[in-house]
Image: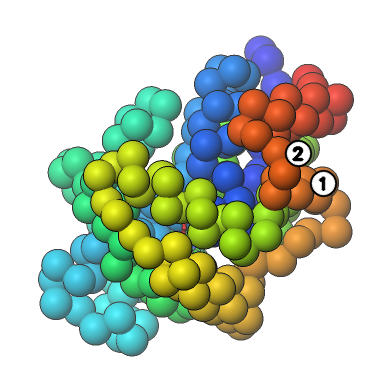
Amino acid sequence: MEKRVVVAIDGPAGAGKSTIARRVAGKLGFVYIDSGAMYRAVALAALRGGADLDDAERLEQLARATRIEFEPGGARVLLDGEDVSAAIRAPEMSPAASKVSVFSGVRRALVEKQRQMGAAVSVVMEGRDIGSVVFPDAQVKIYLDADPQVRAARRVSEMEERGQALVAAEVEREIRERDRRDSTRADSPLLRAPDAVYVDTTALAADEVERVILEIVRKKAL
Ligand code: DC
């Protein structure tokens, strides 16, 4: 049997994690898992159900009870069987996901699901705490970063491709606020694990980042 490999990619919003993790998983034939989509799905379930985003107990219940699935390749995210891929990407879902992710009960429920998803197969999983908490024994840990201005510009063009016009300055403000909340929360804050390879993508095109990361994976795990 081939050995199971975990590639953990962490970093702030807009550093290029989703694009790169999806591409790297495709090249390696690994399963791609976007853990941020799971926090977004819980936030969506909460907003739809009229739950207060401060109600830790209710949010934990929701995180435990909802079924979150990814179609192969990560193209679609299913929440209790419904395709919510577009709904979780609405601009208001970013701060909402960041808010629900503060609660330890929510994190415990989702970390459990994430570990199950990566238990038997090789995965590329991206998020904020994958190398530090979800899979501390991952063979490959990457920390992707970029200047906030560049990250905001990327988010604007990504949303443009989906037909949504956003104001760059507003997106940058929201990204900085999310960085602050994600890095200062008590439970599993976004941090650069000491054993993670730091990759600054500010001046790099996606192809270059992909090449750098594939190289790291081949050296460390294959
Ligand atoms: O990666 P993203 O922008 O889709 O994530 C949305 C929010 O979810 C992010 O602001 C913080 C939270 N999150 C988290 O706390 N831990 C993860 N592993 C992934 C995301």
Q: In what element is the residue under mark 1?
A: strand
Left or right of 57 on screen, residue 113: right
Mark 1 residue crowding within 10 angstroms, few (<14) / some (14–19) / many (20+): some
- Give the image location of residue 184, x and y in percent: 62, 81
Which three-letter amino acid code belongs to the residue tagged 1? Val
Left or right of 87 on screen, residue 148: right
Which residue is located at x 41 percent, y 76 percent? 99
**Above-or-below relation of 27 to 147:** above
Left or right of 136 on screen, residue 113: left
Which residue is located at x 44 percent, y 63 percent? 168
Question: Residue 140's mark?
Answer: 2
Asked whether disc 1 touches disc 2, contact meaning CB atoms under 8 Å apart, the reply is yes
The numbered mark, 1 or 2, whose residue comes first in the sequence reads: 2
**Above-or-below relation of 5 to 114:** above
Question: Residue 135's mark?
Answer: none
Say if disc 1 is inside 8 Å of ligand 1.
no
- Give the image location of residue 1, x and y in percent: 66, 13
Q: Quadrant of the C terminus?
A: top right
| Residue at the bottom extreme of this rendering | 54
The quadrant holding residue 106 is bottom left
Viewer can see residue 211? yes
From the viewer's side, name the closer residue of 77 and 91. 91
Which three-letter amino acid code belongs to the residue tagged 2? Val
Q: Give the residue at mark 1.
A: 197
Q: In what element is the residue under mark 2?
A: strand
What colouring does the structure picture have? rainbow
Mark 2 residue crowding within 10 angstroms, few (<14) / some (14–19) / many (20+): many
Viewer can see residue 182? no
From the viewer's side, name the closer residue of 141 and 203. 203
- Give the image location of residue 27, x and y in percent: 59, 18
Which residue is located at x 68 percent, y 55 percent? 146
Which residue is located at x 24 percent, y 83 percent? 52
